[in-house]
Amino acid sequence: MPEASGSVSRALRTAPPDQLAETADAVLRQTLGAARAEVFVADYRASGLWPVLDPDVPDGGPLLAHSVAQRCFSSQEPVLDIVEDGRCRAYLPLSVWGERLGVLMVELPGDPDAATVEAARDAAGELAVAIRAADRETDRYRRARRRERLSMAAEMQWDLLPGRSVRLGDALLAGQLEPAYTVGGDHFDWSVDGDRLTLTVLNGTGSGLAASMLTAMTVNAMRNARRSGGSLVEQAELASDTIYYQHRGDRHVATLLLELDSRRGVMRVVDAGSPQLLRLRGGRVTPIALEQQLPLGMFAETRYDVQEFTLEPGDRLFVVSDGVYAAEPDEQEPYGVRAMARAMRSTRLQPATEAVGTVMRELHAYHADADLRDDAVVVCLDWRGPSRSDDVTGQ
């Protein structure tokens, strides 16, 4: 059945960017004899999977509430569900470079053989790449992902994000930003380049559009330095100078900059503020002590130093903003390191892509499911051991 994925790939390359779901459906009907194929994308909070074909239909989602699709999305493996009349619904992960976009459901006659399932999975991979590329050319997939209107600040933040997960060899990185529809200044960013994985997490100051604009300036300054070949120090210093000369010290951004050498497991860090870094190793959560330096933009021509530490295979790192560890619901103590560590320990058997959601759900539960008062960022990095420089794959 290799012709299925090849046919899907060729058809998707010539399809209009907003018609990828319909194109995949038509080709899979022709090549695999499918009765239908439907595309479901994860919403901004990854709390549901929603249909692209008709996201506004009543009771059309969330599909994530159904265990079969949830198993596929969580495990990133095909899951088969035999339904009435002997038909089979194959749920296949829509993933690219480690980012989980959603699930492709293909309804097939009878119980498919392994070759058919593998052909459908390859087609889902081709579709995921196409959707990721088309996301800049059409609003259709973003409309399906959002369950309510975003604030202007949140719109800017989501456009600025790199994605929600990425894999580099045996390193898997995932992040989640809340509250998804009203977030202001907190942010995360990352980039993969050879054996190097660069990550930044920001605690934006203020709220609303002004905070989002400050974050956008900071992130783009760091990207400018990074894309010009600049080191972590150069990224921090260019961003700091940019903020200072724009706001003359009245605004600043607490930022943690990290760079992982995935081949050696060496982490280089510039700590310029309040995001906290914690390590889960052997069931124990411990903060990593760093020399905290000045937030970006506080003074002119601030200079920064790099610190290093070494990871062991199996280590998991969490980076959290103050909206997580310092959260203060009504008439309660701050969330704090103890409750946060308990939530992190509970993720031991989950991949990083699931772990960020678990920690965020525990935070929401601590707030009795009320809206969070402050932006919250949770980023999780797993390092399993040395990797080859060309091993960048999806999960």
Image (spheres, rainbow, N blue to C red):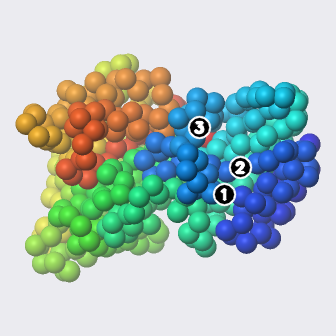
Q: Which residue bears the numbered disc 2?
A: 38
Which callout, 3 or 2, points to the residue nearer the camera? 2
Where does the N terminus fall, quadrant-wise? top right
Which tag is nearer the camera, tag 3 or tag 1?
A: 1
Q: Type of residue at label 3?
A: Phe
Q: Nearer the viewer, residue 169 or 209?
A: 209
Residue bearing the label numbered 1: 53
Element class at badge 1? loop
Q: Earlier in the sequence, mark 3 or mark 1?
A: 1
Q: Residue furthest left?
A: 331
**Quarter of the image containing the C terminus?**
top right
Q: Amino acid at mark 1?
A: Leu
Residue 254: quarter of image: bottom left
- For residue 73, the mark is 3
| Discs 1, 2 touching: Cβ within 8 Å | yes
Q: Amino acid at mark 2?
A: Glu
Residue 195 visible in rendering? no
- Residue 201 horizontal/vertical position (percent): 32, 53
Label 2 secondary element: strand
Front residue (pair 3, 379): 3
For marks 1 and 2 on the same chain, the one whose residue lies earlier in the sequence = 2
